[in-house]
Amino acid sequence: MSDAEEVVEEYEEPFVMPNLIPPKIPDGERVDFDDIHRKRMEKDLMELQTLIEVHFESRKKEEEELINLKDRIEKRRSERAEQQRIRSERDKERQKRLEYQFARQKYEVSSRNSSKHVTQALH
């Protein structure tokens, strides 16, 4: 499974709100609106704290993923640099061998030609 698929799977977790009980309105003529308001504020506060916690957990995971990604990128860069260095060394060695072979062939051809001239001059 690729890293992208793992990331998608991690974020597919549904957000679950804690079980919150709505304030009960008492039966009777007298309704305490201050109590209802206080309970509503407590409920909103709990909901907000939950959202904040989820947000920061998500940010923490994203930060860890970003650090891992940067590490992988840096590792890949160093591996590529090493591969290119090795390839460059091989190319230099190959070029030296080709130059040596070319010089050797040129020397052999020139030595054959010079021996032909010597042989022809003796006859």
Image: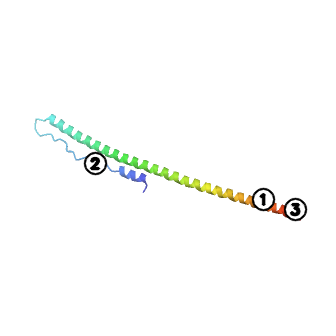
* Displayed quadrant of residue 102: bottom right
Q: Position of residue 46 (x, y in %)?
A: 23, 42
The residue drawn where x is 79% and y is 62% is: 112
Q: Nearer the viewer, residue 82 or 28?
A: 82
Q: Position of residue 115 (x, y in %)?
A: 81, 63
Residue located farthest toward the front when viewing the structure as drawn: 122
The local secondary structure at tag 3 comes to helix
Quadrant holding the C terminus: bottom right
Callout 3, which amino acid?
Ala
Q: Disc 3 or 2, which lies upstream in sequence? A: 2
Tell me if mark 2 has few (under 14), some (14-19) or many (20+) residues whose alpha carbon lies within 10 angstroms of its own. few
Whole-number angstrom distance, CA of label 2 to CA of label 1: 88 Å
Q: Earlier in the sequence, mark 3 or mark 1?
A: 1
- Disc 2 residue type (three-letter): Val
Foreground pick, 96 / 64 = 96
Relative to 38, 103 lies left or right: right
Q: Residue at x 21, y 37 (%)?
A: 41
The part of the image, by quadrant, that contains residue 122 is: bottom right
Q: Earlier in the sequence, mark 2 or mark 1?
A: 2
Residue at image x 81%, y 60%? 114
Q: CA distance from mark 3 to mark 1?
A: 16 Å
Label 1 is placed on what type of residue? Ser
> In this figure, which residue is indicated by the disc labeled 2?
16
Mark 1: which secondary structure?
helix
Mark 2 falls on what kind of element? loop
What color scheme is it? rainbow
**Numbered tag placed on residue 121 in the rendering:** 3
Q: Is residue 14 left or right of residue 99?
A: left
For residue 106, side relative to residue 71 (left or right): right
Q: Looking at the picture, how far across and down is residue 121, in whole percent? A: 87, 62
Marks 3 and 1: which is nearer the front? 3
Tell me, for residue 110, which label it has, or none.
1
